[in-house]
Amino acid sequence: MKKMISKNNIFIALVLLGLIFVASLPAFRSGIYQGHDLNFHLGRIQAIAEELKKGQFPVRYESNAWYGHGYVSTTFYGNIFLYIPALLYMAGLPVWRAYNVYVILVNVFTALIGYYSFKGLLKSDRWGLVATGIYMLAGYRLSNLYVRTALGEYTAMIFVPLVIYGIYRIYVNKGEYSTIKLILPLIIGTTGLIESHILTTELIAVFVFIYALVNIKRTIACIKELLIALAAILGINAFFLIPFIDAYTFMDLYINTELSQTSIRSDGLYLSQLFGILTTGKGSSYPWTTEGEGYLNVGIVVILCIVAALVLLIRDIINKNANKNFIILFAFGIFAAWMSTVYFPWDAFAGSNSLDQLMSSVQYPWRYVMILTVCFTICGVYALRELCGKINFAVIFCVVGAIAIITTGVFDYTLSWGNITVANQSADENWADKLYLPVDTDRDSLSDTEIIIDDKLGTVTLPVLAYENVKVYDADGNELEYTVGQNNCVQVTYDGDYTKLYTRFEEPVLWRVSEVVSLVCIILLLFSYRKRREL
């Protein structure tokens, strides 16, 4: 007990609470700043609540989206964490307050998981705390929270450090833990990524794969642990991955057809943004310019990390004692920085083949700033520790902390005067985006909810999009076969009372099986962990 309430632990707890408070300040308000994707995510929260009330679990389909035409974004977009604000909304909170509570919880878990991960990577609680502060208040993360309101991405950023630590733990600390304890951080971290944001998962997976190739000998030595972790990850997340892959493969949607036809290079960053010392809390994304894009500036704290890491790298190369993992992370950070810019050859990946679709799925090159941020947070703090060993830690802590808080203050100030505040009791009716609409759907026409009768053909076109697994029934509960009619809507041949027709989304058996698989895997994992602790 005395160990838990030591001065050091009290200090760590107070700093983490302070970080959570500073990062959450814009969420302690009676409203939300109107971020880029805010309407979409408020709509997702409300849609999950509505579908849960209707008995749909897990939620795969938003029946009220697009004016009742339906939508399937939840099949492609992990939403398990959004059940928290959805339940708060169901309990009576307005959707904006449920969202703000979620933002605060995200900051809480980013601090806790970040500290655990960085402490493990740097093998120091004090330097782990510094890294947590830099990561928590990094410009890109704050912009994701309050300017872009990129809910999936900022949720995934909770788990990115844990995935890195999970890989490091397997490769470096094998033999110090039982197998289940060794691989647990990687399993939890990767599961968090998958259930938050599939694009971030793809980005991290590519870099992890490269790391495994670079360290091929160590990879082979750890292959058993890596394969067990992979099997556990796939099993636990089968309930999301199998429906996602099934739907992505067999549905022709904007996200997997037209999106990759155009180069995304125009949305890349310029050097002035990579070395922009202040991240502002306002703006939007514009092609081929930096004007109005100050919210994408990397920020001085991360830039200082880059400089410190570069100085250490040069010193260690001269002395021929560079740390291999440090070099790899540094290289990843530099490569991610290049990929985030207009200087990367994104034009070469405008096409329809699998590689083009994979590369273009990121949508905006500047998403790679997330990789840059986490890599240089680790490298930079490691470099500060190695370069400033003779300087009192308190001095470094105060200097880095002061810079981070001042730049966060600038961000919050520009956020407050550069954006309007909204306080929606419920989400906007037209919250859904176009990414998961069937190809060639006319979005403007979806506001028309009239049933179309063609007496000559004897057909009835319902104002419901003809997605896979949408079923049509008559008043007696008989399922009717249908074709894809006008504007990709459900069309049935029917001569009865068409006003009694209704549609329902039904999960295929394969999806239900995947849910059972996930449940069994979670139980097995918990049982294995508990059994190991008892030994």
Image (spheres, helix red, strand yellow):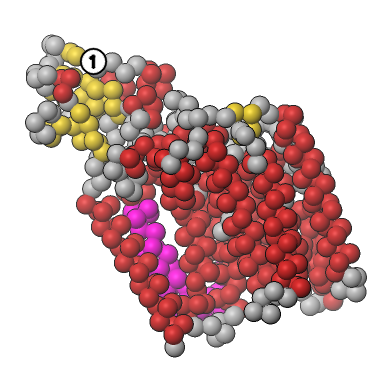
x then y, percent, for residue 333: 69, 57
243 relative to 224 in the view: left or right: left
User: In the rendered image, which quarter contains the C terminus?
Assistant: bottom left
- Amino acid type for the residue under numbered disc 1: Ile
Name the residue that disc number 1 marks. 452
Determine if the magenta segment contains residue 236. yes
Task: Tell me if I can see residue 476 in this picture.
Answer: yes
Indicate whether 429 appears above or below 93.
above
x then y, percent, for residue 185: 53, 69
- SS at badge 1: strand
x then y, percent, for residue 234: 39, 63
Indicate whether 362 appears above or below 238.
above
Quadrant in which residue 314 is drawn: bottom right
x then y, percent, for residue 415: 72, 35
What range is drawn magenta here? 213-242
Determine if the magenta segment contains residue 226. yes
Quadrant in which residue 274 is drawn: top right
50 relative to 281 in the view: left or right: left
289 relative to 483 in the view: left or right: right
Residue at image coords 50%, 35%: 94
Residue at image coords 33%, 63%: 519
Residue at image coords 10%, 34%: 478
Residue at image coords 47%, 30%: 426
What main secondary structure does the magenta stretch of the protein show?
helix
Most foreground residue, 318 or 97: 97
User: In the rendered image, which quarter contains the N terminus?
Assistant: bottom right
Indicate whether 20 appears above or below 183.
above
Q: Residue furthest bottom?
A: 535
Q: How many marks?
A: 1
